[in-house]
């Protein structure tokens, strides 16, 4: 009976979001209530557990998601993202525009949703295509795969943040491992275009307009709104780590204060305002309003996912599975498969990450995954599954294809297969690092 309940919960989440187009927030809450009653709690107890799980998640990551959204909007509205692209193209040369766009996509997608970032940069890649002679399809796939990599691995993107809170993994460590893994996975997207679109690389590059790019004299400063928060959070994670016994000094207290992820990201938002134009100053409140609106739905879905996971952890959910014979590597593979199935069926990477994290969290101890690095690598595996694969039921797939003027068959052939390869590489990295580090 309990197995049927488990299968039923998955079906409710998938069918309600796919067939009936119900917002995942409601699907997860309904599933949480059914799970509570099904696992033996009365209605009152189930509701109380849902509220407890919901509020604990929101308190933990709500401000972080909002801060990340504000940073993303500020970077977009001030034109900083486009300037970053110009710096990369100038720095690496027009001949290396594909890898430049791949890397800049990875960087920009750390604070900006991949869908919004691709739409924002769609006009830029078309301009780069004209200036360099590269086919638009090459530049589009390189940019799209770079954006997608940070989206599923690197905080403050909501999916990884939510998974870290649900699984109780340190965000600072996730940032470090996510950056390392994400860069490799991102480059795999570029290498895929080198192989699959090889014939289009053998064309003369137009050099006459290279100097027309609009780049600031202090070009490297343009990256400070993203790099400063990354550095602050990374240092914070080391200071807060139980493996280092540091004395409380004014410096460590300052690092602990400024390095808190939500504070560090807000500092990045402030730095991005150095690139604001005078005529845009009166738009600041509107931009913050847009950020709040954009983050609201994600915060609700994340809270519902946390509530669902809390119900499962509080129940006898673990007794459904004979997990005594499952080791950490097998647990990571299970997390990947579950995430990949949910992603492939319902389309949303964020929902896939949150839902899988809620299911997997109660099982980690029985898998033998108890260390911080083990939990982080499980999230990396979940993120890898959430890339596998992007196709016609994924809004990002249509953003990439439509804004790049790609035919459906080409989008499926080049972008969808790229996400499959990236997901499998991410899984391989998570397994390899787990074996080496635990």
Image (spheres, rainbow, N blue to C red):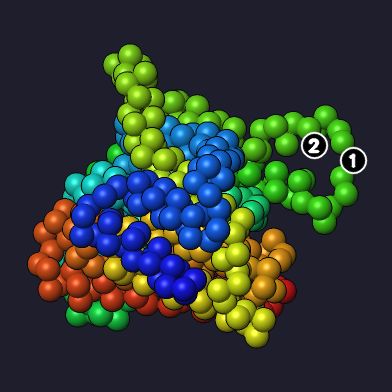
Asked which secondary structure carries label 1, the reply is loop
Reply above or below: 268 against 310. Answer: above
Up-down relation of residue 50 to residue 176 (above or below): above
Q: From the viewer's perspective, is 395 left or right of 180?
A: left
Whether tag 1 and tag 2 are in contact, CB under 8 A, the answer is yes
Q: Quadrant of residue 275?
A: top left
Q: Residue furthest top?
A: 282
Q: Position of residue 354 (x, y in %)?
A: 46, 56
Name the quadrant of the C terminus.
bottom right
Residue occupying the point 19% across, 65% down:
392
Marks counted in the figure total 2
Question: How far from the left and from the top, in percent, is residue 205?
Answer: 21, 65
Which of 2/63 is in front?
A: 2
Counting from the top left corner in percent of width and height, residue 133 is at 17, 62
Q: Residue at x 19, y 47 (%)?
A: 123
Q: In this rendering, does residue 161 appear at all?
A: no
Q: Is residue 211 above or below residue 408?
A: above
Q: Is residue 391 above or below residue 126?
A: below
Q: Position of residue 39 (x, y in %)?
A: 53, 61
Residue highlighted by disc 2: 252
Q: Which residue is mark 1?
A: 247
290 left or right, relative to 404: right
Residue 58 visible in the shown view: yes
| Sequence-first tag of 1 and 2 | 1
């Amino acid at each position: 009976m309990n197995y049927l309940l488990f299968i039923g919960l998955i079906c409710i989440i998938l069918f309600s979001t796919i067939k009936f187009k119900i917002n995942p927030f409601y699907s997860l809450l309904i599933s949480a209530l059914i799970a509570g009653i099904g696992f033996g709690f009365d209605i009152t107890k189930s509701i109380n557990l849902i509220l407890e799980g919901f509020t604990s998640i929101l308190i933990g990551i709500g401000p972080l998601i909002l801060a990340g959204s504000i940073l993303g909007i500020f970077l977009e509205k001030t034109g900083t993202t486009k300037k970053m692209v110009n710096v990369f193209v100038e720095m690496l040369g027009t001949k290396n525009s594909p890898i430049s766009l791949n890397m800049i996509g990875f960087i920009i997608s750390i604070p900006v949703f991949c869908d919004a970032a691709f739409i924002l940069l769609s006009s830029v890649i078309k301009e780069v295509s004209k200036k360099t002679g590269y086919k638009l399809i090459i530049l589009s796939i390189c940019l799209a795969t770079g954006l997608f990599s940070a989206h599923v691995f690197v905080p403050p993107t909501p999916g990884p943040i939510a998974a870290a809170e649900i699984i109780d993994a340190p965000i600072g460590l996730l940032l470090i491992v996510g950056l390392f893994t994400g860069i490799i996975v991102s480059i795999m997207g570029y290498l895929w275009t080198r192989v699959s679109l090889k014939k289009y690389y053998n064309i003369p590059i137009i050099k006459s307009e290279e100097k027309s790019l609009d780049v600031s004299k202090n070009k490297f400063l343009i990256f400070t709104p993203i790099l400063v928060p990354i550095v602050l959070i990374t240092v914070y994670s080391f200071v807060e780590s139980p493996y280092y016994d540091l004395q409380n000094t004014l410096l460590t207290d300052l690092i602990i204060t400024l390095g808190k992820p939500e504070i560090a990201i807000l500092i990045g938002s402030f730095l991005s305002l150095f690139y604001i134009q005078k005529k845009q100053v009166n738009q600041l409140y509107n931009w913050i309003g847009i950020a709040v609106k954009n983050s609201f739905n994600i915060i609700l879905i994340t809270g519902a996912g946390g509530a669902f996971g809390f119900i499962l952890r509080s129940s006898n959910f673990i007794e459904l599975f004979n997990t005594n014979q499952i080791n950490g590597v097998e647990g990571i593979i299970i997390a990947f498969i579950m995430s990949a199935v949910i992603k492939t069926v319902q389309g949303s990477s964020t929902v896939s990450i949150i839902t899988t994290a809620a299911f997997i969290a109660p099982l980690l101890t029985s898998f033998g995954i108890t260390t911080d690095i083990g939990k982080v690598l499980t999230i990396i595996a979940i993120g890898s599954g959430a890339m596998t694969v992007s196709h016609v039921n994924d809004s990002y797939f249509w953003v990439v294809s439509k804004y790049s003027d790609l035919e459906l068959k080409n989008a499926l052939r080049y972008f969808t297969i790229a996400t499959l390869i990236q997901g499998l590489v991410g899984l391989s990295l998570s397994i390899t690092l787990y074996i080496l580090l635990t």
